[in-house]
Amino acid sequence: MYSLRLLATTLSTSSLVFGLLGLPSVPSAACLNITSTLGIAQTAVSPLDLRYINSRTSYWNMKLDAHAPACVVYPENAQDVSLILKAIKASGSRFAIKAAGHNTNDLFSSVEDGVLIDLTEMTGKSYDASTTLATYEPGSRWGELYDYYLQYGRTVVGGRVYDVGTGLALGGGVSYLSPQYGMACDSFRELEVVLPSGDIVTASSTQNPDLFFGLRGGGGNAFGVVTKYTVQSRPIGTLYAGNLLYVLDHREAILNATRDFILYNTDPKAAVLMNFNIVTIPDLELGLDQACVMFLVYDGEDPGNAFSNFTAIPSLLNTLGPKTYPQVANLPIPKLAIISRADNIFRIGVHRADDDSYWTAFDRFYQWSQDHKGDYIYVHLDYNPVPKSMTDASRAQGGNAMEMPDGPWFWAEYTITTPPLISTQKYNEIQASFKALVDGTPNAADLPYFLNEAHADQDALKTFSSYPRLQQIKQKYDPDEFFSKKSGGWSFS
Ligand SMILES: Cc1cc2nc3c(=O)[nH]c(=O)nc-3n(C[C@H](O)[C@H](O)[C@H](O)COP(=O)(O)OP(=O)(O)OC[C@H]3O[C@@H](n4cnc5c(N)ncnc54)[C@H](O)[C@@H]3O)c2cc1C
Ligand SMILES: *[C@@H]1O[C@H](CO)[C@@H](O)[C@H](O)[C@H]1NC(C)=O
Ligand SMILES: *[C@@H]1O[C@H](CO)[C@@H](O)[C@H](O)[C@H]1NC(C)=O
Ligand SMILES: *[C@@H]1O[C@H](CO)[C@@H](O)[C@H](O)[C@H]1NC(C)=O
């Protein structure tokens, strides 16, 4: 009763504030229900509540901050998530599931006037030395997980960047360790899942194996809410890693070296990411407005000749050296390649390194960047190798929802950061032009797009050979189309 009275006071004060801010003045039935069931400690109904502000304004695409949820709820376990989903369903409210909010697509982890389920209170993790299995809940960032498992000399296959969240693994997840162990989702062994019905189930190769298949790279926010991941951990020690920074005059040599690495490197402990960056305001320290930053990571202290094609090209900066795994997640030192919270959008391409698209993707990107100065504050193009060792490692663990054809091939990831304070019309024009740039380079017809870096309008799931099977799985686990209709995410129809 006491907490209900407190709640009533909070609500009437905030209704007033809502009204003043022009925000919805009537709290939704779902929010009232969840607040009375879970208590105010696990809910934030006022847009002035610091937790609400943090949850709402921590999207990597800042445009998503504009959405005002009716409330933000902070489950602590699968039972909480189950209650929350049932209350949302009964009320007819909209909702979104958010881990670390790095997906750049509208309404994938953001919601307007519905319930935002923020998973960041769920940070449990463990390591079992007898099985070498690790567990983590969805609320940590990859860097926090790497810090934790390091005490055991272990790590998990996850993101390359410290701040990114666990939603990455549901979209596949490329790690610097992927050439050895496959995608992040390939290391899943058992998942605790709250289904759209609110039922709490286990997905593994023996329990609900179809659900397990879908969750291995079929995208977050599709089949349920994953509340616990049990994964195969991996040994980790000292790595040899860092960045090489080049002026763009060397672009042909860099593209040659990356192509040769994609086609000929056979050492699965070596991973590279080629990253061309163009900014409109020159980097203060380096005085550059365009550069290539190579990310080079070797899982071991001696890379042999794995990176010598790159070190042979004259570089402005070389930070290669021994590093711990958490340090590897905190590359780069060159500021030019650091993109932070802003009006960021991703798009994806997929190609083979031995055909023309390898060159035309870069040429078209470069030309666009020169022709559209003023339309962006930052653009980049990444080439992300998918070697044969990676697709072999995936298959050896049962394969994933991408059903990745044999490497080598690569994903081309495009990012644009548009200037702040431009009109909606200007914003839409720039995005349409950037889309045309990406669409203009033909993709390899038999290769899957990468969900984690695809734009919602690219319909990435349809490039998976498993798409019909995923549609069936979706229908089985979300038969009322509760998630499809009331939340954002990838379309299955
Ligand atoms: C700086 C940066 C670096 C990146 N580096 C990499 C990289 O190295 N490798 C890579 O593969 N990708 C990378 N990405 C892409 C990244 O994988 C995607 O942005 C991914 O969506 C981020 O997950 P998140 O948890 O941070 O985001 P969120 O937006 O919170 O979640 C992503 C999606 O998954 C859903 N979701 C999250 N958790 C759950 C859950 N427990 N149950 C059900 N659905 C859930 C959300 O609803 C949302 O639709 C990077 C992105 C950025 C911005
Ligand atoms: C909350 O919603 C659930 C699911 O419909 C319902 O069973 C429960 O009675 C509701 N509780 C309150 C306090 O409204
Ligand atoms: C790149 O490789 C091609 C052969 O594929 C070669 O002709 C060209 O000279 C190389 N360029 C540089 C700068 O190394
Ligand atoms: C380096 O480039 C040469 C061709 O110039 C190629 O034969 C070799 O395989 C490359 N090595 C690696 C590790 O990429």
Image (cartoon, grey):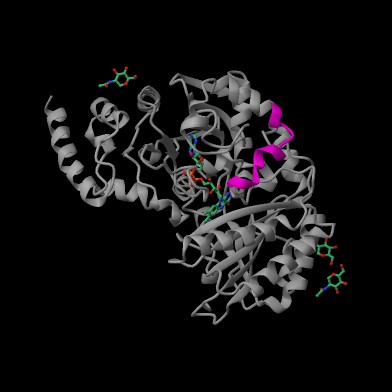
Residue drawn 57% across the image and 79% down it: 288
388 lies left or right of 184: right
Residue drawn 66% across the image and 38% down it: 461
Residues in magenta, as a range: 456-468
Residue 150 lies, with reference to residue 3, above or below; the image says below
Residue 475 lies, with reference to residue 21, above or below; the image says above
Snapshot quadrant of residue 291? bottom right
413 lies left or right of 41: right
Q: Position of residue 125 (x, y in %)?
A: 43, 36
Magenta part, dominant SS? helix
Q: Position of residue 34 (x, y in %)?
A: 29, 28
Residue drawn 24% across the image and 49% down it: 48
Which residue occupies the foreground of this view, 87 or 60?
87
Farthest bottom residue in view: 287
Q: Position of residue 451 (x, y in %)?
A: 62, 44
Viewport quadrant of the N terminus: top left
Q: Quadrant of ligand 4?
A: bottom right
Which residue occupies the foreground of this view, 303 or 426?
426
Which residue occupies the foreground of this view, 157 or 489?
489
* Magenta span includes 334: no
Residue drawn 26% across the image and 40% down it: 45
Q: Is residue 383 visible?
A: no
Q: Is residue 430 visible?
A: yes
462 lies left or right of 40: right
Farthest front residue in view: 425
Which residue occupies the foreground of this view, 317 or 274?
274
137 lies left or right of 447: left
Residue 144 lies, with reference to residue 29, above or below; the image says below
Snapshot quadrant of residue 247? bottom right
Q: How many marks?
A: 0
